[in-house]
Amino acid sequence: LFSAPAKDDTATFVLGANAEEYAGETVVSNASCTTNGLAPVAKVLDDAFGIENGLMTTIHSYTSSQPILDAKHKKDPRKGRSGAVNLVPTTTGAAKAISKVLPSLTGKINGQAIRVPTADVSMVDLTVTLNKDVTVEDVQAAFKTASEGSHKGILGVDEEYRVSMDFVGEELSTVVPLDTIQVIGNKMVKVLSWYDNEWGYSCRLVDMAVHISK
């Protein structure tokens, strides 16, 4: 079990998305923290309403790959800029990795990242066009139902108006603040979801190790 996205055809599994499809593969990927934050949200929406297409942005705390002071970067000039004082637009493989864990969404979701000067906790900003007409209340109900049933222990909801520091140490893969859900034109939906990109992902690695050892 390795803690990174697979760059080849290595089987990839995410709890709350496709973990039940594990069939004894000897080497598997648990994808990335962002894919673990995104995939359960996308699955709830796709199962409940059907996703036609969408775009996501991960507002991601800076990581050890970014310098504290401006420096040269061999591939991306932006990544050479100080991570502690800048918002840095960059790429993410999380949206493309969705196709490995939710094949029904292949070619339907793309995205990017913005690295921000916080040490921990990130946020998925997902905007999708659905196949069905919905209201804000419909979408809120879908996530609340999932958090208490099919995705209990993986996806949660927040009704306490928390901010990023309140999610340091959060064990769930992803937590949707219900009051931030927006709907326009009946089918376009925006969902935000918090995730602790360090501890939350570490918890899923342990859970996945237990899952594949059964």
Image: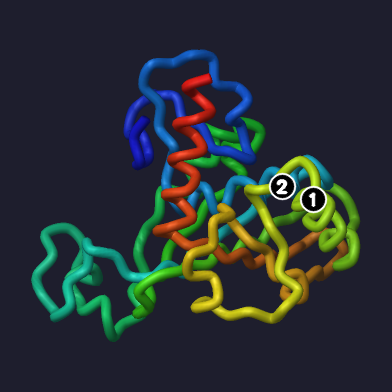
Element at label 1: helix
Q: Check whether the beta carbons of the residues at disc 1 and disc 2 lie within 8 A of each other.
A: yes
Is residue 97 rendered to the left or right of residue 15? left
Q: Position of residue 76 (x, y in %)?
A: 21, 63
Q: CA distance from mark 1 to mark 2?
A: 5 Å
Q: Depth check: give the residue in front, 77 or 98.
A: 98
Is residue 197 rendered to the left or right of residue 3? right
Amino acid under disc 1: Glu
Snapshot quadrant of residue 26: top left
- Please give the name of the residue rendered at 35% of the width and 41% of the height, measured from the top-left corner: 3
Q: Position of residue 44 (x, y in %)?
A: 74, 47
Q: Is residue 99 above or below residue 63?
A: above
Q: Position of residue 167 (x, y in %)?
A: 54, 70
Label 1 belongs to which residue?
Answer: 148
Label 2 belongs to which residue?
Answer: 152
- Please give the name of the residue rendered at 66% of the width and 33% of the height, measured from the top-left corner: 104
Snapshot quadrant of residue 63: bottom left
Is residue 82 rendered to the left or right of residue 183? left
Q: Depth check: give the residue in front, 208 or 48.
A: 208
